[in-house]
Image (spheres, grey):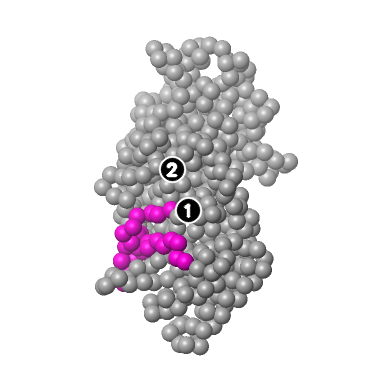
Amino acid sequence: MSNIKNKTINVAILQLKAWPFSKHEENKEHIFQFIEKASTLKPDLIVLPECVYPCYFLSPRIIPDYKALGILCDNFLTEIKNYAKKYGTFLALCLPEYIPDKNLLYNSAVLIDDKGEEIGRTRKSFLWHFDSKWFKPDSYYPVFDTRIGKIGMFICADGRQPEIARSLSLQGAEVLLDFTNLVTTGLEKRNWTNPQVDYIIPTRALENRIWIVLANKVGFEENSIQCCGKSAFFSPDGEAVKMASSDHEEILFKEIDLSLSNQKNINNAIDVFKDRRPELYDYITLPTNNLPEKDIFLKPSDAKIKNPFAAVIQIKGQSSSLEKDDDFSTILSRIEYYFHTLAEQDVDILSFSQINNLSIQNNTIILDLLKELTKNTSRLCSFVLKENEGSANYKTIYLVQSGKVIGRYSKTHIKFPERDNITPGKDGFPVYKTQFGNIGLLLDYEGFFPEIARILTLKGADIIIWAGQFGLDEHIKICQTRSAENKIFTICLNSIEQNGNGHSVIVSPSGQIIAGCLENQEIASATSISICMSRDKVIVPNTNAILNRLPESYYRLTSL
Protein backbone atom coordinates (compact mmCIF):
# COMPACT_ATOMS: atom_id res chain seq x y z
CA MET A 1 0.00 0.00 0.00
CA SER A 2 0.99 3.67 -0.15
CA ASN A 3 4.00 5.10 1.63
CA ILE A 4 2.40 8.11 3.30
CA LYS A 5 5.71 9.55 4.55
CA ASN A 6 7.16 9.80 1.04
CA LYS A 7 3.76 10.52 -0.54
CA THR A 8 4.18 7.72 -3.08
CA ILE A 9 1.20 5.77 -4.37
CA ASN A 10 0.86 2.91 -6.83
CA VAL A 11 -1.60 3.62 -9.63
CA ALA A 12 -3.02 1.30 -12.29
CA ILE A 13 -4.65 2.68 -15.43
CA LEU A 14 -7.03 0.34 -17.25
CA GLN A 15 -6.93 1.09 -20.96
CA LEU A 16 -10.04 -0.72 -22.20
CA LYS A 17 -11.65 -1.15 -25.58
CA ALA A 18 -14.75 0.83 -26.56
CA TRP A 19 -18.02 -1.10 -26.52
CA PRO A 20 -21.44 -0.25 -28.01
CA PHE A 21 -24.51 -0.19 -25.76
CA SER A 22 -25.79 -3.42 -27.33
CA LYS A 23 -22.90 -5.28 -25.65
CA HIS A 24 -23.02 -3.61 -22.24
CA GLU A 25 -23.32 -6.90 -20.37
CA GLU A 26 -20.18 -8.26 -22.02
CA ASN A 27 -18.50 -4.93 -21.34
CA LYS A 28 -19.34 -5.16 -17.63
CA GLU A 29 -17.80 -8.61 -17.23
CA HIS A 30 -14.77 -7.47 -19.22
CA ILE A 31 -14.25 -4.52 -16.86
CA PHE A 32 -14.46 -6.77 -13.80
CA GLN A 33 -11.89 -9.14 -15.31
CA PHE A 34 -9.46 -6.27 -15.84
CA ILE A 35 -9.96 -5.01 -12.28
CA GLU A 36 -9.11 -8.50 -11.03
CA LYS A 37 -5.95 -8.54 -13.16
CA ALA A 38 -4.92 -5.09 -11.94
CA SER A 39 -5.49 -6.08 -8.31
CA THR A 40 -2.61 -8.55 -8.50
CA LEU A 41 -0.28 -5.53 -8.80
CA LYS A 42 -1.47 -4.28 -5.39
CA PRO A 43 -2.39 -0.78 -6.56
CA ASP A 44 -3.54 1.96 -4.21
CA LEU A 45 -5.71 3.37 -6.99
CA ILE A 46 -7.24 1.99 -10.20
CA VAL A 47 -8.39 4.49 -12.85
CA LEU A 48 -10.84 3.63 -15.67
CA PRO A 49 -11.82 5.66 -18.79
CA GLU A 50 -14.71 8.05 -19.48
CA CYS A 51 -18.17 6.44 -19.69
CA VAL A 52 -16.47 3.10 -19.22
CA TYR A 53 -19.94 1.59 -18.77
CA PRO A 54 -22.26 1.09 -20.51
CA CYS A 55 -20.86 3.18 -23.41
CA TYR A 56 -20.12 6.75 -24.51
CA PHE A 57 -22.56 7.19 -27.42
CA LEU A 58 -25.92 7.49 -25.64
CA SER A 59 -28.18 8.41 -28.54
CA PRO A 60 -31.92 8.30 -27.65
CA ARG A 61 -32.29 6.30 -30.84
CA ILE A 62 -30.24 3.54 -29.16
CA ILE A 63 -31.22 4.18 -25.52
CA PRO A 64 -34.76 5.66 -25.47
CA ASP A 65 -35.22 5.31 -21.70
CA TYR A 66 -32.65 7.23 -19.64
CA LYS A 67 -34.41 6.25 -16.44
CA ALA A 68 -33.61 2.62 -17.20
CA LEU A 69 -30.06 3.69 -18.10
CA GLY A 70 -29.75 5.31 -14.68
CA ILE A 71 -30.80 2.12 -12.92
CA LEU A 72 -28.33 0.14 -15.01
CA CYS A 73 -25.48 2.47 -14.03
CA ASP A 74 -26.47 2.52 -10.35
CA ASN A 75 -26.39 -1.28 -10.25
CA PHE A 76 -23.00 -1.32 -11.96
CA LEU A 77 -21.64 1.21 -9.46
CA THR A 78 -22.78 -0.99 -6.58
CA GLU A 79 -20.86 -3.92 -8.03
CA ILE A 80 -17.76 -1.78 -8.60
CA LYS A 81 -17.82 -0.71 -4.94
CA ASN A 82 -17.75 -4.36 -3.93
CA TYR A 83 -14.63 -4.87 -6.06
CA ALA A 84 -12.92 -1.89 -4.39
CA LYS A 85 -13.69 -3.37 -0.98
CA LYS A 86 -12.72 -6.91 -2.02
CA TYR A 87 -9.29 -5.88 -3.31
CA GLY A 88 -8.66 -3.05 -0.84
CA THR A 89 -8.03 -0.44 -3.50
CA PHE A 90 -9.37 2.99 -4.40
CA LEU A 91 -11.28 3.00 -7.70
CA ALA A 92 -11.99 5.98 -9.94
CA LEU A 93 -14.30 5.66 -12.92
CA CYS A 94 -16.65 7.64 -15.11
CA LEU A 95 -20.20 6.72 -16.16
CA PRO A 96 -23.58 8.35 -16.89
CA GLU A 97 -25.50 9.70 -13.88
CA TYR A 98 -29.27 10.12 -14.16
CA ILE A 99 -31.16 12.49 -11.82
CA PRO A 100 -34.79 11.23 -11.93
CA ASP A 101 -36.55 14.16 -10.26
CA LYS A 102 -34.91 16.63 -12.68
CA ASN A 103 -34.74 14.32 -15.69
CA LEU A 104 -31.08 15.27 -16.17
CA LEU A 105 -28.20 13.16 -17.40
CA TYR A 106 -24.62 13.99 -16.38
CA ASN A 107 -21.28 12.59 -17.44
CA SER A 108 -19.89 11.87 -13.97
CA ALA A 109 -16.64 10.72 -12.41
CA VAL A 110 -16.86 8.81 -9.14
CA LEU A 111 -14.13 8.19 -6.56
CA ILE A 112 -14.51 5.10 -4.34
CA ASP A 113 -12.28 4.27 -1.37
CA ASP A 114 -10.75 0.93 -0.42
CA LYS A 115 -13.69 0.14 1.85
CA GLY A 116 -16.13 0.37 -1.03
CA GLU A 117 -17.53 3.76 0.03
CA GLU A 118 -18.11 6.61 -2.37
CA ILE A 119 -15.88 9.57 -1.48
CA GLY A 120 -17.38 11.96 -4.02
CA ARG A 121 -17.97 12.75 -7.65
CA THR A 122 -17.57 15.46 -10.23
CA ARG A 123 -19.36 16.07 -13.52
CA LYS A 124 -18.14 17.03 -16.96
CA SER A 125 -18.20 20.77 -17.51
CA PHE A 126 -17.00 21.38 -21.08
CA LEU A 127 -19.18 19.13 -23.22
CA TRP A 128 -17.78 17.76 -26.46
CA HIS A 129 -19.49 17.46 -29.82
CA PHE A 130 -22.51 15.13 -29.72
CA ASP A 131 -22.43 14.38 -25.98
CA SER A 132 -24.01 17.81 -25.40
CA LYS A 133 -27.16 16.37 -27.00
CA TRP A 134 -27.87 14.24 -23.92
CA PHE A 135 -25.53 15.37 -21.13
CA LYS A 136 -25.87 18.60 -19.14
CA PRO A 137 -22.76 20.48 -18.00
CA ASP A 138 -21.90 21.12 -14.35
CA SER A 139 -19.51 23.59 -12.75
CA TYR A 140 -18.39 22.07 -9.47
CA TYR A 141 -14.69 21.22 -9.18
CA PRO A 142 -14.08 19.47 -5.82
CA VAL A 143 -10.79 18.14 -4.49
CA PHE A 144 -10.95 15.10 -2.21
CA ASP A 145 -8.51 14.84 0.69
CA THR A 146 -8.06 11.07 1.02
CA ARG A 147 -5.76 8.69 2.82
CA ILE A 148 -3.72 8.24 -0.38
CA GLY A 149 -3.55 11.92 -1.31
CA LYS A 150 -5.49 14.96 -2.45
CA ILE A 151 -7.31 13.99 -5.63
CA GLY A 152 -9.02 16.15 -8.26
CA MET A 153 -10.91 14.81 -11.25
CA PHE A 154 -11.92 16.12 -14.66
CA ILE A 155 -13.39 14.51 -17.75
CA CYS A 156 -11.94 14.49 -21.26
CA ALA A 157 -12.65 17.84 -22.98
CA ASP A 158 -12.48 19.58 -19.58
CA GLY A 159 -8.74 19.32 -20.15
CA ARG A 160 -9.08 21.80 -23.00
CA GLN A 161 -10.25 24.50 -20.58
CA PRO A 162 -7.23 25.66 -18.54
CA GLU A 163 -9.45 27.12 -15.81
CA ILE A 164 -10.65 23.67 -14.70
CA ALA A 165 -7.28 22.03 -14.00
CA ARG A 166 -6.15 25.35 -12.51
CA SER A 167 -9.13 25.49 -10.14
CA LEU A 168 -8.41 21.96 -8.93
CA SER A 169 -4.70 22.62 -8.51
CA LEU A 170 -5.25 25.84 -6.58
CA GLN A 171 -7.25 23.81 -4.04
CA GLY A 172 -4.18 21.76 -3.24
CA ALA A 173 -4.71 18.70 -5.43
CA GLU A 174 -1.65 16.47 -5.65
CA VAL A 175 -2.86 14.38 -8.56
CA LEU A 176 -5.52 14.98 -11.21
CA LEU A 177 -7.41 12.08 -12.78
CA ASP A 178 -8.49 12.58 -16.39
CA PHE A 179 -11.13 10.17 -17.74
CA THR A 180 -11.26 10.26 -21.54
CA ASN A 181 -12.74 9.05 -24.81
CA LEU A 182 -10.10 10.77 -26.94
CA VAL A 183 -11.28 10.54 -30.52
CA THR A 184 -8.96 10.30 -33.48
CA THR A 185 -8.65 9.37 -37.11
CA GLY A 186 -5.94 8.02 -39.37
CA LEU A 187 -4.90 5.28 -41.75
CA GLU A 188 -3.06 3.11 -39.22
CA LYS A 189 -4.00 2.34 -35.62
CA ARG A 190 -0.43 2.46 -34.40
CA ASN A 191 -0.22 6.13 -35.44
CA TRP A 192 -3.47 7.26 -33.84
CA THR A 193 -3.15 10.17 -31.46
CA ASN A 194 -4.96 13.26 -30.17
CA PRO A 195 -3.91 16.86 -29.29
CA GLN A 196 -4.74 16.24 -25.65
CA VAL A 197 -2.11 13.54 -25.20
CA ASP A 198 0.36 15.22 -27.57
CA TYR A 199 0.51 18.64 -25.91
CA ILE A 200 -2.59 19.86 -24.04
CA ILE A 201 -2.46 17.55 -21.00
CA PRO A 202 1.36 17.75 -20.80
CA THR A 203 0.92 21.53 -20.65
CA ARG A 204 -1.74 21.22 -17.94
CA ALA A 205 0.72 19.16 -15.88
CA LEU A 206 3.57 21.63 -16.39
CA GLU A 207 1.67 24.89 -15.90
CA ASN A 208 0.26 23.56 -12.61
CA ARG A 209 3.29 21.41 -11.69
CA ILE A 210 1.06 18.45 -10.90
CA TRP A 211 0.70 14.74 -11.75
CA ILE A 212 -2.05 13.93 -14.24
CA VAL A 213 -3.25 10.36 -14.77
CA LEU A 214 -5.11 9.92 -18.06
CA ALA A 215 -7.23 6.81 -18.76
CA ASN A 216 -8.46 6.38 -22.33
CA LYS A 217 -10.13 3.71 -24.48
CA VAL A 218 -8.99 2.02 -27.68
CA GLY A 219 -10.89 0.95 -30.76
CA PHE A 220 -14.30 1.78 -32.17
CA GLU A 221 -17.74 2.47 -30.79
CA GLU A 222 -20.69 2.34 -33.19
CA ASN A 223 -18.19 1.83 -36.05
CA SER A 224 -17.51 5.56 -36.15
CA ILE A 225 -16.07 6.81 -32.85
CA GLN A 226 -12.36 5.96 -32.83
CA CYS A 227 -10.41 6.14 -29.55
CA CYS A 228 -6.65 6.57 -29.72
CA GLY A 229 -5.50 4.89 -26.50
CA LYS A 230 -2.24 6.41 -25.24
CA SER A 231 -3.35 6.39 -21.62
CA ALA A 232 -0.50 7.95 -19.68
CA PHE A 233 1.13 9.29 -16.53
CA PHE A 234 2.15 12.93 -16.98
CA SER A 235 4.65 14.21 -14.44
CA PRO A 236 4.73 17.75 -12.98
CA ASP A 237 7.49 18.46 -15.52
CA GLY A 238 4.92 17.99 -18.29
CA GLU A 239 6.49 14.75 -19.51
CA ALA A 240 4.67 11.52 -20.38
CA VAL A 241 6.75 9.28 -18.11
CA LYS A 242 4.76 6.19 -19.09
CA MET A 243 2.31 5.84 -21.98
CA ALA A 244 0.21 2.99 -23.35
CA SER A 245 -0.17 1.96 -26.97
CA SER A 246 -2.68 3.45 -29.37
CA ASP A 247 -4.16 0.17 -30.53
CA HIS A 248 -4.66 -2.41 -27.77
CA GLU A 249 -5.94 -2.88 -24.24
CA GLU A 250 -3.45 -2.91 -21.40
CA ILE A 251 -2.84 -2.15 -17.74
CA LEU A 252 -0.42 0.71 -17.17
CA PHE A 253 1.12 0.63 -13.70
CA LYS A 254 3.39 3.14 -11.98
CA GLU A 255 4.46 4.39 -8.58
CA ILE A 256 4.16 8.18 -8.45
CA ASP A 257 5.63 10.55 -5.88
CA LEU A 258 2.89 13.03 -4.98
CA SER A 259 5.35 15.27 -3.14
CA LEU A 260 6.60 16.42 -6.57
CA SER A 261 3.23 18.14 -7.07
CA ASN A 262 4.05 20.46 -4.17
CA GLN A 263 7.16 21.82 -5.89
CA LYS A 264 5.84 24.65 -8.04
CA ASN A 265 9.15 26.03 -9.31
CA ILE A 266 10.05 25.91 -13.02
CA ASN A 267 13.70 26.22 -14.05
CA ASN A 268 14.44 28.36 -10.98
CA ALA A 269 12.70 31.12 -12.89
CA ILE A 270 9.08 31.21 -11.70
CA ASP A 271 6.70 29.69 -9.19
CA VAL A 272 3.55 28.77 -11.09
CA PHE A 273 1.34 29.68 -8.11
CA LYS A 274 3.16 32.33 -6.07
CA ASP A 275 4.01 34.34 -9.18
CA ARG A 276 0.45 34.50 -10.43
CA ARG A 277 -1.18 37.96 -10.38
CA PRO A 278 -4.82 37.10 -9.55
CA GLU A 279 -5.66 40.78 -9.02
CA LEU A 280 -5.16 41.18 -12.79
CA TYR A 281 -7.32 38.22 -13.87
CA ASP A 282 -10.86 39.58 -13.45
CA TYR A 283 -11.61 39.14 -17.16
CA ILE A 284 -11.58 35.37 -16.69
CA THR A 285 -14.72 35.41 -14.55
CA LEU A 286 -16.74 37.91 -16.63
CA PRO A 287 -19.88 36.42 -18.22
CA THR A 288 -19.36 36.25 -21.96
CA ASN A 289 -22.21 38.67 -22.61
CA ASN A 290 -20.44 41.24 -20.42
CA LEU A 291 -17.20 41.17 -22.38
CA PRO A 292 -16.59 44.41 -24.31
CA GLU A 293 -15.44 42.37 -27.31
CA LYS A 294 -18.30 39.85 -27.17
CA ASP A 295 -19.40 40.60 -30.74
CA ILE A 296 -16.20 39.03 -32.03
CA PHE A 297 -17.31 35.71 -30.53
CA LEU A 298 -20.98 36.07 -31.39
CA LYS A 299 -20.38 37.40 -34.94
CA PRO A 300 -16.95 36.09 -35.87
CA SER A 301 -16.76 37.05 -39.54
CA ASP A 302 -15.05 40.27 -40.65
CA ALA A 303 -14.14 40.49 -44.33
CA LYS A 304 -12.32 43.84 -43.95
CA ILE A 305 -9.35 42.39 -42.09
CA LYS A 306 -6.30 41.63 -44.23
CA ASN A 307 -4.85 38.17 -43.73
CA PRO A 308 -1.15 38.80 -43.06
CA PHE A 309 1.95 36.92 -44.10
CA ALA A 310 3.93 36.69 -40.84
CA ALA A 311 7.54 35.82 -40.03
CA VAL A 312 9.47 34.76 -36.95
CA ILE A 313 13.07 36.04 -37.05
CA GLN A 314 15.83 34.57 -34.90
CA ILE A 315 18.51 37.27 -34.66
CA LYS A 316 21.62 37.49 -32.49
CA GLY A 317 24.27 39.93 -31.38
CA GLN A 318 27.94 39.54 -32.17
CA SER A 319 29.47 39.48 -28.68
CA SER A 320 28.67 39.34 -24.98
CA SER A 321 28.61 43.12 -24.75
CA LEU A 322 26.70 45.12 -27.33
CA GLU A 323 27.72 48.43 -25.82
CA LYS A 324 30.51 48.60 -28.40
CA ASP A 325 29.71 50.78 -31.42
CA ASP A 326 30.80 48.17 -33.97
CA ASP A 327 28.64 45.46 -32.40
CA PHE A 328 25.62 47.71 -32.21
CA SER A 329 26.08 48.81 -35.82
CA THR A 330 26.08 45.14 -36.79
CA ILE A 331 22.76 44.62 -35.02
CA LEU A 332 21.23 47.58 -36.83
CA SER A 333 22.46 46.26 -40.15
CA ARG A 334 20.99 42.80 -39.41
CA ILE A 335 17.61 44.35 -38.60
CA GLU A 336 17.70 46.24 -41.90
CA TYR A 337 18.78 43.13 -43.79
CA TYR A 338 15.87 41.02 -42.50
CA PHE A 339 13.37 43.82 -42.99
CA HIS A 340 14.26 44.39 -46.64
CA THR A 341 14.70 40.70 -47.44
CA LEU A 342 11.34 39.75 -45.96
CA ALA A 343 9.63 42.82 -47.43
CA GLU A 344 10.62 41.51 -50.85
CA GLN A 345 8.90 38.27 -49.84
CA ASP A 346 5.71 40.22 -49.03
CA VAL A 347 5.88 39.60 -45.27
CA ASP A 348 3.45 41.86 -43.38
CA ILE A 349 4.34 41.06 -39.73
CA LEU A 350 8.02 40.78 -38.78
CA SER A 351 8.65 39.57 -35.23
CA PHE A 352 12.24 39.63 -33.95
CA SER A 353 13.60 37.40 -31.18
CA GLN A 354 15.15 39.00 -28.11
CA ILE A 355 18.74 40.28 -28.22
CA ASN A 356 20.70 40.26 -24.97
CA ASN A 357 22.87 43.08 -23.65
CA LEU A 358 21.15 45.89 -25.51
CA SER A 359 21.47 49.00 -23.38
CA ILE A 360 18.54 51.22 -22.54
CA GLN A 361 20.42 54.07 -24.22
CA ASN A 362 20.12 52.29 -27.58
CA ASN A 363 16.31 51.94 -27.41
CA THR A 364 15.65 55.19 -29.23
CA ILE A 365 18.03 54.30 -32.05
CA ILE A 366 16.38 50.90 -32.65
CA LEU A 367 12.86 52.32 -32.46
CA ASP A 368 13.82 55.13 -34.83
CA LEU A 369 15.22 52.57 -37.26
CA LEU A 370 12.02 50.50 -37.14
CA LYS A 371 9.94 53.64 -37.66
CA GLU A 372 12.05 54.60 -40.65
CA LEU A 373 11.89 51.13 -42.16
CA THR A 374 8.11 50.82 -41.80
CA LYS A 375 7.37 54.40 -42.89
CA ASN A 376 5.18 54.57 -45.99
CA THR A 377 4.42 50.85 -45.65
CA SER A 378 1.79 48.84 -43.78
CA ARG A 379 4.40 46.46 -42.36
CA LEU A 380 4.36 45.78 -38.65
CA CYS A 381 7.41 44.88 -36.55
CA SER A 382 7.67 43.60 -32.97
CA PHE A 383 10.85 44.09 -30.95
CA VAL A 384 11.83 43.63 -27.28
CA LEU A 385 13.72 46.40 -25.49
CA LYS A 386 14.39 47.62 -21.97
CA GLU A 387 13.18 51.04 -20.92
CA ASN A 388 13.22 53.13 -17.80
CA GLU A 389 10.89 55.61 -16.20
CA GLY A 390 12.43 57.40 -13.27
CA SER A 391 13.91 54.70 -11.04
CA ALA A 392 11.81 51.93 -12.63
CA ASN A 393 13.18 49.65 -15.36
CA TYR A 394 10.81 47.72 -17.58
CA LYS A 395 11.13 44.96 -20.17
CA THR A 396 8.87 45.95 -23.02
CA ILE A 397 7.78 44.54 -26.35
CA TYR A 398 6.92 47.20 -28.95
CA LEU A 399 4.73 47.14 -32.04
CA VAL A 400 5.91 49.51 -34.77
CA GLN A 401 3.87 50.06 -37.93
CA SER A 402 3.82 52.67 -40.67
CA GLY A 403 6.45 54.80 -38.99
CA LYS A 404 4.81 54.82 -35.54
CA VAL A 405 4.81 52.90 -32.27
CA ILE A 406 1.25 51.57 -32.25
CA GLY A 407 1.51 49.35 -29.19
CA ARG A 408 3.67 48.33 -26.27
CA TYR A 409 3.51 45.96 -23.33
CA SER A 410 5.75 45.85 -20.27
CA LYS A 411 5.71 42.41 -18.72
CA THR A 412 3.91 41.98 -15.41
CA HIS A 413 5.15 38.52 -14.33
CA ILE A 414 8.85 38.85 -13.49
CA LYS A 415 11.14 35.81 -13.21
CA PHE A 416 13.42 35.33 -10.19
CA PRO A 417 16.74 36.47 -11.76
CA GLU A 418 15.27 39.78 -12.95
CA ARG A 419 13.57 40.96 -9.81
CA ASP A 420 16.39 43.22 -8.68
CA ASN A 421 16.43 45.22 -11.91
CA ILE A 422 13.04 44.81 -13.66
CA THR A 423 9.79 46.42 -12.46
CA PRO A 424 6.42 44.77 -13.19
CA GLY A 425 4.40 46.59 -15.84
CA LYS A 426 1.28 48.41 -14.77
CA ASP A 427 -0.82 48.62 -17.93
CA GLY A 428 -2.57 45.26 -17.65
CA PHE A 429 -2.84 43.13 -20.78
CA PRO A 430 -3.61 45.40 -23.76
CA VAL A 431 -4.80 44.19 -27.14
CA TYR A 432 -4.07 46.38 -30.18
CA LYS A 433 -6.36 46.63 -33.18
CA THR A 434 -4.51 46.57 -36.48
CA GLN A 435 -5.40 46.02 -40.11
CA PHE A 436 -4.02 42.49 -39.63
CA GLY A 437 -6.33 41.67 -36.74
CA ASN A 438 -6.11 42.22 -33.00
CA ILE A 439 -2.72 41.56 -31.41
CA GLY A 440 -1.84 40.72 -27.81
CA LEU A 441 1.67 40.50 -26.38
CA LEU A 442 3.52 38.21 -23.94
CA LEU A 443 7.08 38.08 -22.63
CA ASP A 444 9.22 35.23 -21.32
CA TYR A 445 7.56 32.91 -18.78
CA GLU A 446 4.22 34.71 -19.06
CA GLY A 447 3.27 32.14 -21.67
CA PHE A 448 3.38 29.51 -18.92
CA PHE A 449 0.49 31.24 -17.13
CA PRO A 450 -2.72 30.24 -18.96
CA GLU A 451 -4.62 33.15 -17.41
CA ILE A 452 -2.80 35.76 -19.51
CA ALA A 453 -3.35 34.26 -22.96
CA ARG A 454 -6.98 33.62 -21.98
CA ILE A 455 -7.48 37.26 -20.99
CA LEU A 456 -5.94 38.47 -24.26
CA THR A 457 -8.31 36.15 -26.13
CA LEU A 458 -11.32 37.42 -24.17
CA LYS A 459 -10.22 40.95 -25.09
CA GLY A 460 -10.43 39.96 -28.75
CA ALA A 461 -6.86 38.96 -29.67
CA ASP A 462 -6.57 37.08 -32.95
CA ILE A 463 -2.80 36.78 -32.67
CA ILE A 464 -0.52 36.62 -29.63
CA ILE A 465 3.12 37.53 -30.14
CA TRP A 466 5.21 35.85 -27.43
CA ALA A 467 8.94 36.59 -27.15
CA GLY A 468 10.93 34.38 -24.77
CA GLN A 469 14.27 32.81 -23.91
CA PHE A 470 13.94 29.05 -23.41
CA GLY A 471 16.48 26.29 -23.75
CA LEU A 472 14.50 23.06 -23.53
CA ASP A 473 11.74 23.46 -26.13
CA GLU A 474 9.07 23.66 -23.42
CA HIS A 475 7.65 26.68 -25.25
CA ILE A 476 6.56 24.56 -28.21
CA LYS A 477 3.89 22.45 -26.48
CA ILE A 478 2.75 25.52 -24.56
CA CYS A 479 2.37 27.47 -27.83
CA GLN A 480 0.32 24.66 -29.31
CA THR A 481 -1.88 24.51 -26.22
CA ARG A 482 -2.41 28.28 -25.96
CA SER A 483 -3.44 28.36 -29.60
CA ALA A 484 -5.75 25.34 -29.38
CA GLU A 485 -7.44 26.24 -26.07
CA ASN A 486 -8.14 29.81 -27.23
CA LYS A 487 -8.40 29.18 -30.99
CA ILE A 488 -5.90 31.90 -31.85
CA PHE A 489 -2.61 32.20 -33.71
CA THR A 490 0.55 32.29 -31.60
CA ILE A 491 3.75 33.80 -32.95
CA CYS A 492 6.48 32.62 -30.59
CA LEU A 493 9.99 34.08 -30.81
CA ASN A 494 12.63 32.15 -28.92
CA SER A 495 16.03 33.73 -28.47
CA ILE A 496 19.22 32.11 -29.79
CA GLU A 497 21.40 33.83 -27.22
CA GLN A 498 22.45 32.70 -23.73
CA ASN A 499 19.58 30.50 -22.46
CA GLY A 500 17.63 30.38 -25.72
CA ASN A 501 17.85 27.55 -28.27
CA GLY A 502 15.69 28.96 -31.05
CA HIS A 503 12.94 26.77 -32.51
CA SER A 504 10.72 29.82 -32.91
CA VAL A 505 7.28 28.82 -34.22
CA ILE A 506 3.98 30.09 -35.55
CA VAL A 507 1.03 27.97 -34.43
CA SER A 508 -2.48 27.93 -35.89
CA PRO A 509 -5.77 27.99 -33.90
CA SER A 510 -5.95 24.21 -34.27
CA GLY A 511 -2.61 23.82 -32.48
CA GLN A 512 -0.61 22.97 -35.61
CA ILE A 513 2.89 24.33 -36.13
CA ILE A 514 2.70 26.12 -39.48
CA ALA A 515 6.13 27.78 -39.46
CA GLY A 516 9.30 27.02 -37.54
CA CYS A 517 12.96 27.94 -37.25
CA LEU A 518 15.96 25.69 -36.78
CA GLU A 519 17.69 25.30 -33.43
CA ASN A 520 20.40 27.83 -32.50
CA GLN A 521 20.55 29.39 -35.96
CA GLU A 522 19.97 32.93 -37.17
CA ILE A 523 17.13 32.41 -39.60
CA ALA A 524 13.61 33.54 -40.52
CA SER A 525 10.50 31.52 -41.33
CA ALA A 526 7.15 32.83 -42.63
CA THR A 527 3.60 31.63 -43.23
CA SER A 528 0.12 32.93 -44.02
CA ILE A 529 -2.32 33.70 -41.22
CA SER A 530 -6.07 33.52 -41.82
CA ILE A 531 -7.73 35.77 -39.26
CA CYS A 532 -11.15 34.20 -39.81
CA MET A 533 -9.75 31.03 -38.21
CA SER A 534 -9.17 32.98 -34.99
CA ARG A 535 -12.62 34.53 -35.07
CA ASP A 536 -14.39 31.17 -35.37
CA LYS A 537 -14.19 29.59 -31.90
CA VAL A 538 -16.03 26.38 -32.83
CA ILE A 539 -13.72 23.38 -32.28
CA VAL A 540 -16.21 20.70 -33.37
CA PRO A 541 -20.00 20.96 -33.79
CA ASN A 542 -21.69 22.06 -30.54
CA THR A 543 -18.36 22.87 -28.83
CA ASN A 544 -17.19 26.50 -28.74
CA ALA A 545 -13.90 27.33 -27.00
CA ILE A 546 -15.27 30.61 -25.60
CA LEU A 547 -19.07 30.47 -25.59
CA ASN A 548 -19.15 27.11 -23.77
CA ARG A 549 -16.97 28.32 -20.91
CA LEU A 550 -18.61 28.63 -17.47
CA PRO A 551 -16.76 31.77 -16.27
CA GLU A 552 -18.70 32.29 -13.04
CA SER A 553 -17.31 28.96 -11.80
CA TYR A 554 -13.68 30.07 -12.26
CA TYR A 555 -13.69 32.37 -9.23
CA ARG A 556 -10.75 30.58 -7.61
CA LEU A 557 -8.47 31.97 -10.30
CA THR A 558 -9.07 35.52 -9.09
CA SER A 559 -8.99 34.81 -5.35
CA LEU A 560 -6.10 36.54 -3.59
The residue at the point 60 percent across, 39 percent down is 229
- Which residue type does callout 1 highlight? Lys
Quadrant where the N terminus is found in the figure: top left
Residue positioned 73% across, 41% down in the render: 187
Asked which secondary structure carries label 1, the reply is strand
Query: Where does residue 445 sit, x and y in percent of width and height?
Result: 42, 60
- Residue 78, position as x, y percentages in the image: 44, 19
Q: Is residue 62 above or below residue 329?
A: above
Q: Quadrant of residue 538?
A: top right
In front of the other: 17 or 541:
541
User: Pointer 2: residues within 10 angstroms few (<14), some, or many (20+)?
Assistant: some
Location of residue 42 with respect to 314 vertically, above or below: above
Who is closer to the viewer here, 465 or 273? 465
How many numbered callouts?
Answer: 2
Q: Which of pointers 2 and 1 lies earlier in the amino acid sequence? A: 2
Residue at which label 1 appears: 433
Could you tell me residue 557's position as x and y percent? 33, 44
Residue nearer the viewer, 476 or 249:
476
Pointers 2 and 1 in contact (CB under 8 A)? Answer: no
**Looking at the image, is 274 positioned above or below residue 116?**
below
Residue 476's disc is: none
The residue indicated by pointer 2 is 293
Residue flagged by tag 2: what amino acid is it? Glu
What secondary structure prevails in the magenta region? loop
Task: Find out whether residue 419 is within the magenta segment.
Answer: yes
The answer to whether 559 appears left or right of 48 in the picture is left
Q: For the point 68% across and 45% down, which residue is it?
A: 191
The magenta span reads 404-431
Asked if residue 436 can be seen in this view, the reply is yes
